[in-house]
Amino acid sequence: MTTAKPRGTLTLAEFCEELQISRRTFYDWRVKGRAPRCLKLPNGDLRIRRADFEQWLNALEGAA
């Protein structure tokens, strides 16, 4: 059974694909507080709001 994806969100796979990183890298960033804010669904899957992703990217750009 597939869980429906909330509108305006990225799955973890989509996030990793967009940045061309591995899941391991994502989880490393998350543990270190460097990943964007995530939503945890009742089934344990993570989603990242597109708005949070864009804000996170803009903050990285400003820090560079």
Image: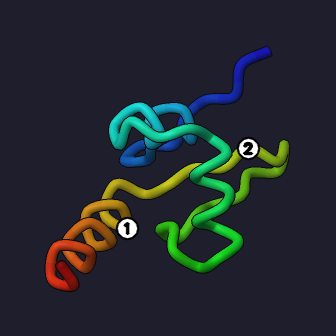
**For the residue labelled by badge 1, is the local secondary structure a helix, a strand or a loop?**
helix
In the displayed structure, 25 sits above or below 11; it is below
Identified by mark 2, the residue type is Asp
Which residue is located at x 37 percent, y 67 percent? 52
Which label is found at residue 27?
none
In the displayed structure, 17 sits above or below 36; it is above
Residue 53 x/y as whole percent: 35, 61
* Disc 1 target residue: 52
Residue 61 x/y as whole percent: 16, 73
Q: CA distance from mark 2 to mark 1?
A: 17 Å
**For the residue labelled by badge 2, is the local secondary structure a helix, a strand or a loop?**
loop
Q: Quadrant of the N terminus?
A: top right
Identified by mark 1, the residue type is Asp
Is 4 placed left or right of 6 in the picture?
right
Q: Earlier in the sequence, mark 2 or mark 1?
A: 2
Residue 60 x/y as whole percent: 26, 74
Q: Residues within 10 Å of mark 2 (few under 14, many from 20)?
A: few
Which residue is located at x 49 percent, y 55 percent? 48
In the displayed structure, 23 sits above or below 59; it is above
Q: Quadrant of the C terminus?
A: bottom left
Label 1 near label 2: C-beta < 8 Å?
Answer: no
* Disc 2 target residue: 45
In the displayed structure, 34 sits above or below 57; it is below
